[in-house]
Each structure stands twice: as structure tokens, then as C-alpha cells.
Image (spheres, rainbow, N blue to C red):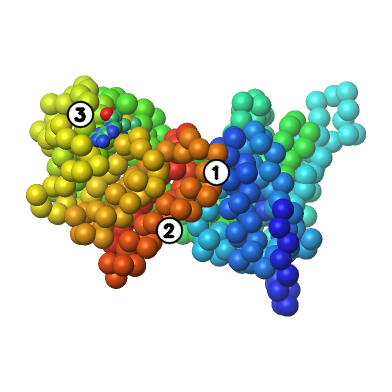
Amino acid sequence: MRRTDPPADPPVDAPGTAFIAHCRAGFEPEAARDLERMAEAAHVASTIVATVGCGYAIARTGRALDLRRAAAYLRDTGPVFVRSAFLAKGPFPIADAAKTGARPDRIVPLVAAAGSLRAATPFSALWIEHPDTNEGKRLSPLARALHARLAGALRERELLDEAGAGAGASRPRLHVMLLDGATAWLGVSDPTSGSPWPMGIPRLHLPRGAPSRSTLKLAEACLTFLGDQETELLHAGMHAVDLGAAPGGWSWQLAQRGLRILAVDNGNLQGAIAEDAHVTHVREDGLRFRPRKPVDWVTCDIVESPSRIAALMGAWIAEGTARQAIFNLKLPMKKRYDEIERCRDIITAMLDRAGLRPRLALRQLYHDREEVTGYLARR
Ligand code: SAM
């Protein structure tokens, strides 16, 4: 919990009094730290509630917040553990009491709650969500069942218009987060700064031929950090070094995109990637290895202390051995947030000394477990 002084000027638009952040179950205290930093940056007094295991953290504010500003603070403070966040009101009762005994009508109370958000324009999308926990997942059939009917009812009242939705849309999205069959938070997020996926979860399927599930981590990292610029930043003909490559899931992603890869690991590559003409397997210590010529990319998934990996990636980029890096920081320790801050400081100090102002982003991705993925790039 943290309190700071509110700013002198009141917000212009007031769609919510709480900020709800989806996160990995068990990482609520870390998501709460992200929210604290945002509240501090925005000078908004807030009470942060983060029950361990519930899959989200809430920052409640004493007064209404403005979406435009909340979105800007979300973008500027770069949350690590918040997967997706929305400005919310509630929780609302959504099972109409008048229908007790019969099947409850949830559409009427949900439409009324959506109307009470008083958005100036129709919402650009409807996302019906639930916490990403085992209990929360039991609500997904209800979420699916409600979607078409609620969207129809919202369109009828001109509260929803999906025309032009998707990347680049500027009208807010409507979030309905079911807590159970009878209660939900409702709120809004800004499509230009929020996660592009409901609950911050990209739907990725394990590709045929990929040698490990961790291939999905690199696929998600590319979507998250490179977005629309992926084909410009990561493309055929580039050279990459993959440190801690075995059994080959990350090398597989790079090979699919046509890069030539030095896969560094004493362990064996498995499946087709072991024979792939794009890949050269190097049995060396990835913590010491350097290629003969600079490369476009270095990726690193070695299980080592986070600060050591941070220093390694800082060195590769500061020296100019690679232009861009994607790496994983394993977090088995208790003070996970402090450790990530320490890694950020290590990298920033190294790049500062080299006179570089790189792009650095650290995020716990959906496919990350006790870990965080980083992206570091020379500008
Ligand atoms: N990214 C891989 C994939 O998608 O299949 C999984 C990597 S696995 C989590 C970690 C790998 O790091 C192991 O194969 C291990 O042998 C390797 N490793 C650990 N220490 C290493 C070191 N000092 N140098 C090179 N590889 C190392």
C-alpha cells in the first residue's frame, strides 16, 4: 500500500476508480509493485490489494481516473509483471436478482454496468475475461456463452462498434472481468497502449517440429517486443547466436524466420533442428563464447543467476557483438522484483558507460513461469 499526493488538476474524463492488472498466479505482489510505480508516477493516492494466488492485483483510488493518463503511465513505467490492465469500476452484481430461481439474466445488469462507464464513444471491442487461475478458468464457458449475446445487446444500444477495431483503434475496449457467476468488474483499456490480447494471453499453438515448448516463449517475445516491426527487425539473412540452445526451441523459431544460427550448448539439439542447414551447433560455454564477427541477434536461455545473464547481455550489446538481444532471467529467489530492478540497473549502467541509450524492456510473458523475458536493442 502506498499513498502519494494527488495532482492539482482534476482528470478530464472519469471512467473508473480502480486499476486492475492481470498477472501470473503467485506473482500478485510483483504486479502490485508495478501498480505502485504507476500510481507514484501519476501522483495518484491508491490502495493496492494483491491476494497471492488470485491472478490479479487492484489499485483502488480515492477518486476517478482518466484513461488517457492511466494509459500513458502504463506505457511510460513499463510494467514487468502486469500482463494486461484496465481502468475499472465495480465489482457489479451481474446475476439479476429478480430472476432468482430461474436462469439469471446477466445481460441486463451487464449492459447497465457498461452504460454506467459513461464512455464518450462506443467501445471498439468487448473482452470478457476472468482471472488466469484454475478457479478462474472454470468461468471460461460462461464467458464464451455471454459474449455474442452481450455484444449484440451493446451494439443495439450503440455502446459497442467494432468497425476499425484492432491495431491502431483509438476508442477504448470494454473489459468484463468475471469474478464468479454473479459478480464482475467492468472497465476500459486503451488499444494503443494495452495488451493486444484478452487477459494478456496470446493464443499460440506448439508448432509441429518444434523440439521444445519453450519455443513458444521466443514466439511470444517476438510478438510482444517487436510487434508490427518484426519483419523489419528479425528477418531472413540475419545472423544470430543462441546461447543455451538445446534442445533447440529458440533456434527453431529463428531458423523458421530464415536466420543463420550458431547454437551454443554442450547439450544435444533434438529433432529436425539438429540437421537444419541454417544451424551450426557449437559445444562451448555460452557465458564465455563470442562469435568471430558481430551478429544481428543474440538470444540467451541459459539457467544462471539473473544478474550474470543481465551483465552478459549488457556486454554483448555494449561491445557491439550483437545489435539486439532477447533473453530470459530465471527468478527462483524470493525478492523477485528487486532482482529484476537490479538487472535493469546493471544493463543500464553498462550501456551508459558505452555512451548508448538502448531500448530495454523486461516482461513476464504468458509462457514464462518463474522467469521474465528481456529485450535489449541498440537504437
Ligand atoms: N531455449 C532452449 C529451447 O528452446 O529448447 C531451452 C534452453 S534450456 C532452458 C537451458 C540450456 O542451457 C540447457 O540446454 C543447458 O545445457 C544450457 N546451458 C546451461 N549452462 C550453459 C552454459 N554455460 N553454456 C551453454 N549452455 C548452457
Q: Are marks 2 and 1 in contact (CB under 8 Å)?
A: no
Instruction: State the image coordinates of residue 263 (x, y, percent, origin top left).
Output: 19, 36
Q: Which residue is mark 3?
A: 266
Of residues 85 and 198, the one drawn nearer to the viewer in this rendering: 85
Instruction: State the image coordinates of residue 112 (x, y, percent, origin top left).
Output: 79, 48
Q: Which residue is mark 1?
A: 335
Instruction: State the image coordinates of residue 218 (x, y, percent, origin top left).
Output: 34, 40
What's the distance in space between the residues labelled 2 and 3, CA to CA? 30 Å
Q: Amino acid at mark 3?
A: Asn
Q: Amino acid at mark 2?
A: Asp
Residue plotted at (53% across, 48% down): 337
Residue 223 visible from this viewpoint: no
Query: Which element is circle 3 on?
Result: loop
Residue plotted at (71% across, 58% down): 2
Side of 371 relative to 318 (left or right): right
- Asked whether mark 3 lies closer than 8 Å to ligand 1, one says yes
Residue plotted at (69% across, 48% down): 58
Query: Which element is circle 2 on?
Result: helix
What's the distance in space between the residues labelled 2 and 1, CA to CA? 15 Å
Quadrant of the image occupied by residue 294: bottom left
What's the distance in space between the residues labelled 1 and 3, CA to CA? 31 Å
